[in-house]
Image (cartoon, helix red, strand yellow):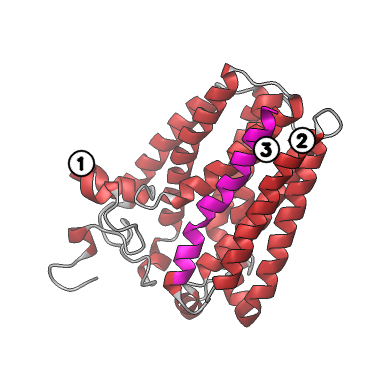
């Protein structure tokens, strides 16, 4: 609890939120604690959940060579769904982690440990977000709907992973990249190997960016016994991140090759592959400037992964129309 006049529940701002974000400045006062619970004041998580969805959709379009109005709805539907399910997932995470969050400097200002929202209110907010996301899911292909239901398992498990494994980032990757499978299937009607390879590429990417993110909390995590790849790798983080970078690029390359050959043109294949390669260069830049002992640098690089993930979106979109 901060000093008088600067209590989190009075000022309301969350410590790692973007300063001057729309929630703190423009949202109705009654809604701010709930929007903060959903991380609406920290949009990077929504981007990281959404971008694999768009990868999967565009990969499916590239494979079939067909695009229609339903694909426009899929692109919009997964965007809304990503916002809702990221919010629901964060709400669930904060419910389960409320005692841990209260012990960590960066997270004790979150709505539940700071007293802005009760657990009962958070559960109601979780249910509301999930219901709307479910209604959107019902508009997709039946096989995509089935994948949506299966995705609830890694989402439910993730908050507990840091209690029993040094690799909680793997569980985050399983949850955050599921949209690659779902959106691909929403377009094609069936899950295929290109989507599986893309999903695995996304998991490699998540291990990369979330290990960087976890270095912000490693000292507090050590004190309270929370596990992470940042603590596991320690001074050897850079070689591990380099491995995740290579795995991400190679697996995304495999996904594109599987989707674009033999029916698409060499030009379309080359453009699509550019997305994987340029994303790899962005990740290499992150690795070059990373200082794991500087929390501000870690947060800045973590947020830069929105741009890294947008690179394949642009290249796959261009390849899809060639």
Given contact means CB atoms under 8 Å apart, are the residues at marks 1 and 2 in contact? Answer: no
Q: Tell me: residue 53, above or below residue 236.
A: above
Residues packed near mark 1 inside 10 Å, few (<14), some (14 to 19) or many (20 plus): few
The quarter holding residue 211 reads: bottom right
Q: How far apart, in angstroms, are the residues tagged by discs 3 and 2?
A: 25 Å
The reply to whether residue 153 is visible in this rendering is yes
- Number of marks present in the image shown: 3
Position of residue 165 relative to residue 21, above or below, is below
- Quarter of the image with the N terminus is bottom left
Q: Residue furthest front?
A: 267
Residue neighbourhood size for the residue with mark 3, other residues' Cα within 10 Å, grouped as few (<14), some (14–19), many (≥20): many
According to the picture, the residue beneath numbered tag 2 turns out to be 267
For disc 2, the neighbor class at 10 Å (few under 14, some 14 to 19, many from 20) is: few
Q: Which residue is mark 1?
A: 28
Q: Where does residue 302 sit, x and y in percent of width and height?
A: 50, 61
| Magenta region, residue range | 297-322
Judging by the rendered image, the residue that carries numbered circle 3 is 181
Q: Residue at x 64, y 27 (%)?
A: 186
The outermost residue toward the left is 5
Q: Mark 1 or mark 3, which is nearer the start of the sequence?
A: 1
Secondary element under disc 1, as helix, strand or loop, is: loop
- Determine the CA span between mark 3 and mark 1: 36 Å
């Amino acid at each position: 609890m901060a000093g008088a006049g600067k209590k989190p529940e009075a000022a309301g701002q969350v410590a790692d939120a973007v300063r001057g974000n729309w929630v703190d400045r423009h949202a109705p006062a009654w809604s701010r604690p709930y929007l903060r619970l959903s991380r609406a004041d920290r949009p990077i998580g929504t981007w990281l959940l959404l971008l694999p969805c768009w990868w999967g959709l565009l990969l499916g379009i590239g494979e079939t060579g067909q695009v229609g109005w339903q694909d426009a709805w899929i692109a919009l539907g997964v965007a809304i769904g990503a916002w809702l399910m990221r919010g629901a997932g964060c709400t669930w995470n904060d419910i389960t982690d409320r005692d841990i969050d209260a012990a960590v400097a960066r997270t004790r200002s979150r709505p539940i440990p700071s007293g802005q929202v009760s657990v009962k209110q958070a559960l109601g907010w979780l249910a509301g977000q999930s219901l709307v996301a479910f209604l959107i899911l019902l508009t997709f292909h039946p096989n995509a709907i089935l994948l949506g239901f299966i995705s609830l398992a890694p989402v439910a498990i993730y908050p507990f992973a840091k209690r029993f494994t040094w690799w909680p980032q793997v569980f985050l990757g399983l949850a955050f990249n599921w949209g690659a499978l779902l959106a691909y299937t929403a377009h094609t009607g069936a899950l295929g190997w290109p989507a599986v390879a893309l999903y695995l590429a996304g998991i490699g990417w998540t291990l990369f960016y979330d290990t960087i993110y976890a270095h912000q909390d490693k000292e507090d995590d050590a004190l309270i016994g929370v596990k992470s790849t940042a603590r596991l790798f320690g001074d050897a983080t850079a070689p591990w991140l380099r491995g995740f970078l290579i795995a991400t690029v190679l697996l995304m390359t495999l996904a594109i090759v599987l989707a674009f050959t033999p029916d698409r043109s060499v030009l379309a294949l080359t453009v699509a592959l550019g997305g994987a390669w340029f994303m790899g260069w962005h990740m290499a830049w992150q690795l070059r400037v990373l200082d794991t002992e500087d929390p501000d640098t870690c947060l800045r690089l973590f947020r830069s992964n929105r741009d890294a993930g947008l690179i394949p979106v642009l290249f796959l979109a261009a390849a899809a129309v060639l």
